[in-house]
Amino acid sequence: MYMELKKPSIPEDIKTRWRRLVNIMGQVTDTSAALITQIHPETIEMLISSESADSPYSENEISPSRCGLYCDWVVANKSPLIVNDAAKDKFWKSNPDMIHNLTFYLGYPLIWPDGEVFGTLCVLDVKDNLSAKKYSDLIEEFQSIVNQDLAFMLDQSVQQQEHNDLEKLLAQQRSEVKNRANDLAEINIAMRVLLNHREKDKEHLQQDLLNEIRQCVKPWLKKLEYTELEKTQQLCVDRIRDHLSDSSSMPHKFWHQLTGMEQEVAEAISQGLSSKFIARKMFVEKSTIDFHRQNIRQKLGLTKSKTNLKQFLLSFQH
């Protein structure tokens, strides 16, 4: 959860609280210096320093790390350290803090929730300090408070990062939705254009087919004109000629709604032919033509209108 997350900076309100803790710790233990340090890759920072007049450290003071300081040992081992008198300890008598004659040290590690060391909480003095050892439990409580603050800050940072990631994801999704909407709009336009082209191609194909039929049939009709035909045969020839003529002038938007029989009836009505004549011409009963008339009026929305069907059909012609 935390490993890849950059550690947050310490806000001023947290520093103010830590400063109160450090001052209390210094006063209770009567030590020369009480500190909260923060470890960096190559240095150690005196992040918070007690306000004791005897303290040789100032806040934000930087020292090289891993050079033998007491705090270096605490950070490296993640363990508390107590040194009663460094002057009598050959391991510690040459450490850099001896420059200030700070022979006593009591320090605890401060650790982020992911196990990474933040720094130390410590007190230092020029003499073996019995009060510091007496109040070590209090210092451990202060250590716990600071560690809890570190956990809280890291949790807040994680939540903020998750919020930022969510906002970024939502922004990406909104962008994807917008792009898809644009794509759909373009597809819709392309489909409309394609359908229009198909409709025009269909009309052209129908016209080409009609022209081809005319070219094939009309010569034979011409020959039949010089042939003696019975009345019924002549009516059939006339009917074929009518179908091949250019009289089909109804617009496609209306014409495609009609059946083949209705188209023939509509063409005849637009030519001014009576129902009786149309029936005889088509070899059907007059009632059949009346039935088709009614269907045509219904498809044209003229059922409840007194509009003359012939005039209405003529108004649609080119």
Image (cartoon, rainbow, N blue to C red):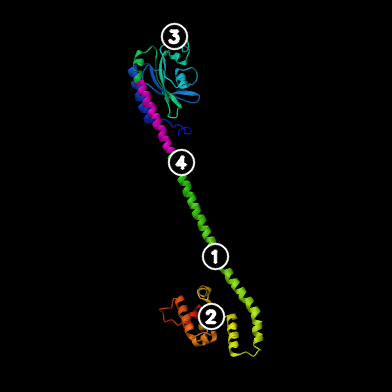
Q: Select label 1 or label 3 by which is in front.
A: 1
Residue 165 visible in the shown view: yes
* Crowd class of label 3 (few under 14; some 14 to 19; many from 20; radius 10 Å): few
Q: Report how far apart the C-alphas of labels 2 and 1 lie in the structure.
A: 28 Å
Does 12 appear above or below 228?
above
Q: Residue at x 35, y 22 (%)?
A: 23
The amino acid pointed to by label 1 is Leu
Does 83 appear above or below 313?
above
Q: Secondary structure at mark 3?
A: helix
Residue tagged 3: 88
* Crowd class of label 4 (few under 14; some 14 to 19; many from 20; radius 10 Å): few
- Write the start and end of the magenta stretch as one range: 138-161
Task: In the rendered structure, find residue 165 and report the number of the disc placed on it.
Answer: 4
- Outermost residue on the top side: it is 88
Q: Select label 2 or label 4 by which is in front.
A: 2
Residue 299: image x %, image y %? 46, 75
The amino acid pointed to by label 3 is Lys
Mark 2 / mark 3, whichever is N-terminal: 3
Residue tagged 1: 195
Q: What kind of secondary structure does the magenta stretch mostly adopt?
A: helix
Quarter of the rendering containing residue 141: top left
Residue 197: image x %, image y %? 57, 66
